[in-house]
Image: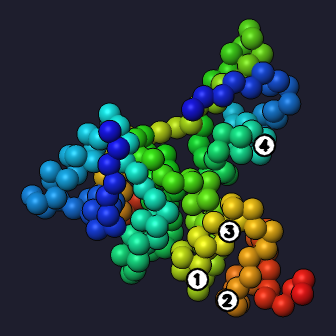
Amino acid sequence: MEKIIAAISKIKGSAKGQIAIPQHIREEMGYSSHAEFRVEYRKGRDQIILTRQRIPAESFFGILSEDAVRRRARN
Amino acid sequence: MMIGIDENILFKFITGDQSKAFRPTRDIIIETAAKGEVFISLALVLEVSRLFQGYQKEKVIEAMLTMTRVAGFSVESPETLTDALEMWAEMHHLSLKDCLLAAIAGAAGADHYYTERKELVKHSHGILAPPDSEK
């Protein structure tokens, strides 16, 4: 799902290059605080494009395998 | 095409069952997710959560949240599931079932969710209320 937000001036930027997406926009897109978005900034058009990040099913396979859990614990 | 799967299949998929017997099923799920949809109902999530007893709760929550972002996985009411998982993450003695029931009621428009489970009653999440409130 993609959503274009025109009024970027209403979105606050942070030092880490992240942006705070207003809750009503998240809700409109159907995702809560855990949702991750790819954010594109269209400079000349005063637009920000949010795209929900998706992961392929093959990457999800074994996400809770013993190896995967051990790997994540090490990191 | 959309397919449905049961809790044992989902459990094996999440835990990465490497057995020869599971390989064709794994391939069907991956292929269907690429071209169609794999339906994951809230009831299925509930059932599979029972199979994760003994697993670290945080890891299970993380996996379930990730599941809502898998391309081709059509999760029934992902917002409700996310609400329930967030609630569950904060509760120490409750099952996902308790949190899911409250989240489903909230999503359906319930203003309050009445329960005798003390931890839920104490919790400040929007719709939860003690059994004797607002009588």
State which chain disc 1 sits on: B
- Distance (Cα) linking label 4 and label 3: 21 Å
Q: Residue at the spot x=80%, y=80% of the render?
A: B129
Marks counted in the figure total: 4
Q: Mark 2 points at which residue?
A: B117
Mark positioned earlier in the residue sequence (1 or 3): 1
Image position, residue B118 (x, y; %): 71, 90
Amino acid type indicated by mark 4: His
Q: Which mark is residue A24?
A: 4
User: Which residue is tagged 1?
Assistant: B94
Q: What residue type is labelled 2?
A: Arg
Q: In this view, does A42 lie above or below A62?
A: above
Q: Quadrant of residue A36?
A: top right
Which residue does the numbered mark 3 point to in the structure image? B105
- Whether discs 1 and 4 lie on one chain: the answer is no
Q: What residue type is labelled 1?
A: Leu
Residue placed most toward the observer, B84 or B108: B108
Provide the secondary structure element on which disc 1 rests.
Answer: loop
Q: Of discs 1 and 3, which sits in the foreground?
A: 3
- In this view of the protein, can residue A16 be seen by the observer? no
The reply to the same-chain question for discs 3 and 2 is yes
